[in-house]
Image (cartoon, rainbow, N blue to C red):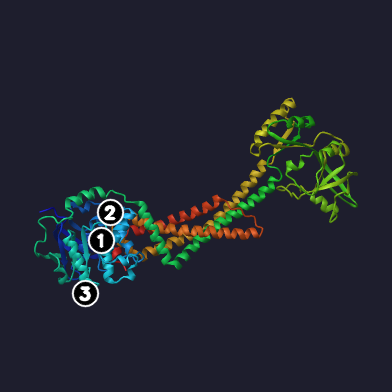
Amino acid sequence: MSTPLIELQNLRKSYGGGDTPQVDVLRGVNLAIYPGEFVAIVGASGSGKSTLMNILGCLDRPTSGRYLFAGEDVAGLNSDELAWLRREAFGFVFQGYHLIASGSAQENVEMPAIYSGLPASERHARAAALLERLGLASRSANRPHQLSGGQQQRVSIARALMNGGHIILADEPTGALDSHSGAEVMTLLDELARQGHVVILITHDWEVAARAKRVIEIRDGAIISDTTHGTAVPEQPVSGTLQAVDLKQRLSQGSQAQGAWKGELVEAVQAAWRVMWINRFRTALTLLGIIIGVASVVVMLAVGEGSKRKVMAQMGAFGSNIIYLNGTAANPRAPQGIVSLSDVKALAVLPQVHKVMPINGNYASVRFGNLDQRVYVGGSNTSFQSIFNWPMSAGSFFTDADEASAAAVAVIGERVREKLFGQTDPLGHYILIENVPFRVIGVLATKGASSGDKDSDLRVVVPYSAASVRLFGNENPEYVVIAAADARKVKDTEKAIDQLLLSLHNGKRDYELTNNAAMIQAEASSQNTLSLMLGSIAAISLLVGGIGVMNIMLMTVRERTREIGIRMATGARQRDILRQFLTEAVMLSVVGGVAGIGLALLIGAALLLGKVAVAFSLSAVAGAFACAMVTGVVFGFMPARKAARLDPVTALTSE
């Protein structure tokens, strides 16, 4: 005789103990089941037969005794190896069908093959063939609630056979069926037994039990009779029967396989989407928190970035690449150093320097009619506009010819125009600068002030030669403005200028070099801090959305506890269940993240129409979406882990 597939030695199962009374459900069961047998375990309700089936199917563990499967002690198997047995060796047929309500008949049948890593094309073909064999080809797309009881039970039989179903465990398979459907199911089980499957039938009905070749009666947790009709154990293995030695070898090899994670992930995504769609209203409420959170983060960062760019543009208008040079005393007792026009000419040929502009200026009284104003008057060359990036609002700037002839022409700032001319067009009019007449030929565009500096628009610009000859009587510049060739290398330019001036001034550092770069960097840092603060405030709403995801996932686990048990009974490992529910949490976050980004773009468009400075950046959008994903993983992990750690028997029997 061949080696038993299943052998129980003095098996006991008890519940309770400690503070609660101990209940002995199984009391010293000894049993051996061989390949090719059709066994019925019969007994009244509460006799322990369902508990025995759960232990046989590796859904539960005994309190004591030994359970040998193909000669291997099941007590030494880990959770993945037990899952492999449920997936590859056993096929469950339950009284309550235990089909997943959100899946079609085809999807329910395919489930064990998904966890075993069967490629999708083979999986689909095998499931379709099984459904056709059981007369359900036209019902493959129907969900369980669209099938009769007999049809649902046939779907569960097809599922049990999906991975081979070498051992069919049928728990009251006809209990919820009418007599006709029950007879059809028993005929199927008879046929499977004849084909070489081990069929273990759990029933309280003696008429149903009589269909088996071997009938085992159990009462009060103990076997009281074991009778055989005809030849219970075939003397020769039935063609196609898998022997114990084969299963033992497959167990040692196959339980280490990881399966096809891609197929499992695709199934997890599809299942997650179905659940979200079925519970649309609840999903929408959950998504609302994620959508608001992501939209808030994106919009706040966009507003912060827009404000930063606007401020930096204003700062840049005052010259981010500009270096100022002026004379100073080398030490407290030394005279003021002088920067001459010859120095300016020498600086102009440095490769690090783009343009050089001497400024000869001072504060002076400017008059038009009976109005006068004390403003800064500066003589410069024609590089003024390009160096300071300062356009005209009216008229034109003076030319090289005006500079060469020391022409008495002036370009005034916007504030000077307001104070002296009001609504009068200043072009062509003469103003008196320290009682010297100058004709106004242009008005500079509004510039404003830079970080507390005096208003830059309260100034007058005249040709350098005219300022030197007509106004101040000194040809040396008050200071020199130098535009670096590369704004990113202002420090290098300063160093080159310093080395040249040291040689020109005989090693005396009687000059001073300053630039706006540090001020602009400080302003940028302040704006970055503001953007970070706005983003942090907005992230709180994303956190609230994440808590909503965790709450809904905990509720989902509670509602779908039986589904978890079904998946475990069909061979799902703990990591498969974890992946399933974690995928659903991430799906919620992904959908919420995409919708949140869309909402943010709409809000941004509305703000732009309202003239609010907004600047969306790809990094901010990607960061907000990534945060939503992380939120799904972090807040979905605990419910998913809770689902993965559920006891299979407890999950299956939950309501």
The answer to whether 403 appears left or right of 224 in the picture is right
- Residue at 20% in and 50% down: 248
* Percent of width and height locating residue 175: 23, 71
Q: Is residue 100 above or below residue 502?
A: below
Tell me how far mark 3 sits from mark 2, CA to CA: 39 Å
At mark 3, the secondary structure is helix
* Percent of width and height locating residue 307: 64, 52
Question: Is residue 510 among the parts visible in the rendering?
Answer: yes
**Number of dots carrying numbers:** 3
Q: Quadrant of the N terminus?
A: bottom left
Residue of label 2: 79
* Percent of width and height locating residue 281: 46, 68
Residue of label 3: 179
Give the residue type that dot 3 points to: Ser
* Percent of width and height locating residue 79: 28, 53
Give the residue type that dot 1 points to: Ala
Q: Is residue 259 above or below residue 227?
A: above
Residue of label 1: 160
Tell me how far mark 1 sits from mark 3, CA to CA: 22 Å
Which numbered disc flags the more N-terminal residue, 1 or 3?
1
Question: Is residue 647 among the parts visible in the rendering?
Answer: no
At mark 1, the secondary structure is helix
At mark 2, the secondary structure is helix
Which numbered disc flags the more N-terminal residue, 3 or 2?
2
**Nearer mark to the viewer, of 3 and 2:** 3
> Of residues 618 and 469, which is closer to you in this image?
618
Mark 2 residue crowding within 10 angstroms, few (<14) / some (14–19) / many (20+): few
> Of residues 243 and 47, which is closer to you in this image?
243
